[in-house]
Amino acid sequence: MKKYKTEFLLEASMGTAGDCFEPENNKVVMAKSMGTDFMQFALVHEARHLLQNNQGRREAEEQNLDYASRLMINRATEADAQTQALQTCLEWQAQGHIGLMKCFEKCYKTITDAYHENNSLSDRSPPQRTSCFVKTG
């Protein structure tokens, strides 16, 4: 965040609204009411949005894209930011800090269930090996 001169704010007025990255103001804003564990992985998520914004998302937003294209970009950037948060929680858990992962699991059960089912940060199952031979005629 320092590299991009991004301001970090804790706001009491957000209530339980959570957190956000404001690209137009170059700010990451988080609600003071969020727990410390939640704030840690949420900060990773929002910092990822900051990085995305500085690696091309901003330029994509400036294009006059149709709705489907904007939706695709939004879904991809959210999935990427959430994957980064999950990966960070897994790394912290491996170092013995289990509270963060427990909080992430509580907040995002479907994501962690998919991870545990496939043991992968992607929800895709490993590709199945198929025969290379094609039957002809």
Image (cartoon, grey):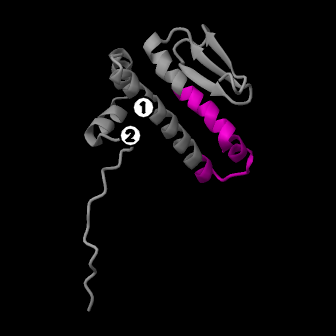
Is 69 a magenta residue?
yes
Q: Residue at x 36, y 45 (%)?
A: 123
Q: Residue at x 51, y 8 (%)?
A: 33
Question: Looking at the image, which is closer to me, 106 or 52?
Answer: 52
Q: Amino acid at mark 2?
A: Leu
Q: Please indicate whether residue 3 sits to the left or right of residue 129 in the image.
A: right
Q: Residue at x 50, y 39 (%)?
A: 80
Q: Which residue is mark 2?
A: 121
* Quarter of the figure with residue 2: top right
Q: Which residue is mark 1?
A: 87
Image: 89 above or below 36 = below
**Label 1, label 2: how far apart the Cα atoms are:** 7 Å
Looking at the rendered structure, the number of numbered marks drawn on it comes to: 2
**Mark 2 residue crowding within 10 angstroms, few (<14) / some (14–19) / many (20+):** some
Assign the magenta stretch its main secondary structure. helix
What is the magenta range? 45-70
Q: Are marks 1 and 2 in contact (CB under 8 Å)?
A: yes
